């Protein structure tokens, strides 16, 4: 046997008898340290985001079955987007409050300051509180929309049957 070769053991391979690179303590630290770092990072993120003012609450708005491409009404529906104390979205129109029944998929979000934002069925921002909107549709009795939230019981509602656009 040459002098530079490692001696063989009973098993025949000397390199199998070497100690592992990581002992039991090293393996425990390899697992515990990343978990502790992740927990600390999560705590920091939670504290930073706790004071955030960007949280918004989803608001259900009354909707109808109209979708783009269907025939639409010709009655102008316009006004300034607003929200009342009941969290009901309406339009402040030239002749008073207009209670719209929005196209299918529309919804709204109320931010922490009480301002509303209106979104279409594709989750695109349509308008924010205080901005003007314009559409067309038909006027109808609210009884046709029984079960929908935020509709008057005796006034007509504006059934939006067109794309809603922001004005001004």
Image: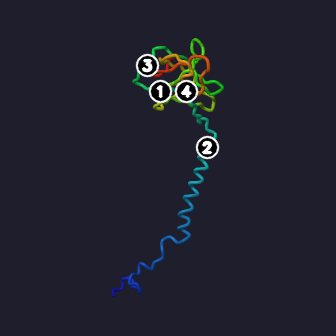
Q: Secondary structure at mark 1?
A: loop
Chain-order first, disc 2 or disc 1:
2
Mark 4 or mark 2, whichever is nearer to me? 4
Q: What residue would you read off at disc 2? A: 48
Q: Secondary structure at mark 4?
A: loop
Label 1 close to label 3 by CB (< 8 Å): no
Packing grade of label 4 (10 A; few <14, some 14-19, many >=20) is: many
The answer to whether 105 appears left or right of 151 in the picture is: left
Q: Secondary structure at mark 3?
A: loop
Query: The N terminus is located in which quarter?
Result: bottom left
Chain-order first, disc 4 or disc 2:
2
Q: Quadrant of residue 122?
A: top left
Packing grade of label 1 (10 A; few <14, some 14-19, many >=20) is: few
Chain-order first, disc 4 or disc 3:
4
- Kindly identify which numbered label has been placed on residue 62: 4
Q: What residue would you read off at disc 3? A: 72
Q: What residue would you read off at disc 1? A: 65
The one nearer the camera, 77 or 49, is 77
**Mark-to-mark CA distance, 1 and 3:** 12 Å
Label 4 close to label 3 by CB (< 8 Å): no
Q: Secondary structure at mark 2?
A: helix
Q: Is residue 45 above or below residue 152?
A: below
Packing grade of label 3 (10 A; few <14, some 14-19, many >=20) is: some
**Mark-to-mark CA distance, 4 and 1:** 11 Å
**Mark-to-mark CA distance, 3 and 2:** 48 Å
The one nearer the camera, 10 or 148, is 148
């Amino acid at each position: 046997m040459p002098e530079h070769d490692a001696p063989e053991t009973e098993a025949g391979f000397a390199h199998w008898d070497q100690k592992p690179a990581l002992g039991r303590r090293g393996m425990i630290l390899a697992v515990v340290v990343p978990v502790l770092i992740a927990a600390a990072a999560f705590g920091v993120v939670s504290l930073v985001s706790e004071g955030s003012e960007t949280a918004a609450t989803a608001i259900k708005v009354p909707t109808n079955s109209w979708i783009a491409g269907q025939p639409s009404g010709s009655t102008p529906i316009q006004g300034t987007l607003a929200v009342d104390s009941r969290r009901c979205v309406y339009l402040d129109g030239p002749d008073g409050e207009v209670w719209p029944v929005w196209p299918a998929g529309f919804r709204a979000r109320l931010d922490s300051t009480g301002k509303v934002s209106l979104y279409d069925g594709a989750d695109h921002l349509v308008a924010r509180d205080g901005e003007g909107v314009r559409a067309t549709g038909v006027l109808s009795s609210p009884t046709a929309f029984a079960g929908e939230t935020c509709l008057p019981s005796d006034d007509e509602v504006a059934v939006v049957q067109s794309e809603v656009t922001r004005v001004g």
